[in-house]
Image (spheres, rainbow, N blue to C red):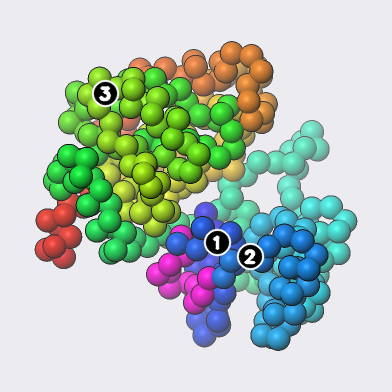
Amino acid sequence: MCTPALRALRHAYPEARVVAMGKQHLGDLVLGLDSVDEFRPLPPKGLLGTIRHARALRREGFDWAILLGESERVAAAPFLARIPVRAGFGRGGLRKAFLNHYLERPRDPDGKLAAFSMIERYLRVTRSLGIPDAGDHMDLCVQDDARAAVSERLGALGVGPDERVVTIISGAAFGAAKTWLPEYFAEAADRLFEAKGLRAVLAPGPGEDRIGAEVARHSKHGVAVLLDPPLQIRETAALLERSAMALSNDTGPRSMAVALGLPVVVPIGPTEDGHTRHHLERQRVLIEDVDCRPCRLRTCPIDHRCMTRITPDRVVSAALELMETVGTGPFRSAQKDSDS
């Protein structure tokens, strides 16, 4: 979701050296982007790591630090490195002290922090520096070696190179409350196979093997589970590119699917949907209007009604309607790859 801001920066300053920093496993998301010259993992947490990081930044003489996240720790190193422009959203006195160009988070009429699109949030930072937008679409590159690895693993599970698949994203790092029921995913996948011939493929992330096994156990037509080892992020991108559509919880791979142009159906439970309220023309976001949402709890203390009341019927109907109106995704077969 930060790629529109990165693209705007590149368009405004095509000769600049742009170094993106983040958690190490996210580096694959910026591989191949024209807007980024280099990716570096953030240093370990702790005072010593921050000081060393600041010294390294100081030696390289960076002109700007554009802080898209809202971490105080990450803002400390550019401050200590005396980078001339340090821009981002302020959140608390210490974070604001580290920045010399900060924005206030918007609030709703009740004074609470407003939930709004992360794409828009990041673009507001670059706009505040006088950088015009260069579109709001998300960018994601798919690497050839990741395509080959996914094709090989699908083949080993009996999924042919020309078979159309629906990718199921059944986990969510936030917690169990954010996940739709495994048996519901299985029923929806079975019905899409019966209606459209889509083979269900599941790629659980680290720690999500139990959820993946539950989906597979409840499916009567079978689910190809890519689990051992879990897919890397770059391979997840290749699987999504290989897919006709996705059924997804509100989690990171959902944004990857949208960036690649897939139709996506998303049941949303305890969390605020405003942060991902963008590019809805190829998505169907399903929300049950219950009194207790958005509770933002990681584990539901009652009956998980915000998710259990979103039935497979609703998801399948939304998926079929979406495929009818916008078509399917950027399906690539192995034959298409060899011809390109």
Q: Residue at x 22, y 27 (%)?
A: 193
Q: Is residue 166 magenta?
A: no
Residue ID for mark 2: 42
Crowding near the residue tagged with mark 2, few <14, some 14–19, many ≥20 C-alpha atoms within 10 Å: some
Q: Are marks 2 and 1 in contact (CB under 8 Å)?
A: yes
- The image quadrant where one finds the C terminus is bottom left
Amino acid found under the numbered disc labelled 2: Leu
Residue ID for mark 3: 190
Query: How many numbered circles are shown?
Result: 3
| Pointer 2 or 3: first along the chain | 2
138 vs 209: above or below: below
Q: CA distance from mark 2 to mark 1?
A: 7 Å
Q: Quadrant of residue 290?
A: top right
As drawn, is 278 to the left or to the right of 46?
A: left
Magenta highlight range: 29-39
Identify the secondary structure beneath mark 3: helix
Amino acid found under the numbered disc labelled 3: Asp
Amino acid found under the numbered disc labelled 1: Gln
| Pointer 1 or 3: first along the chain | 1
As drawn, is 197 to the left or to the right of 18?
A: left
104 vs 17: above or below: above
Most frequent secondary structure within the magenta stretch? loop
The answer to which of 306 and 100 lies nearer the viewer is 306
Camera sees residue 261: no
Camera sees residue 336: yes
Residue ID for mark 1: 24
The answer to which of 163 and 290 lies nearer the viewer is 163
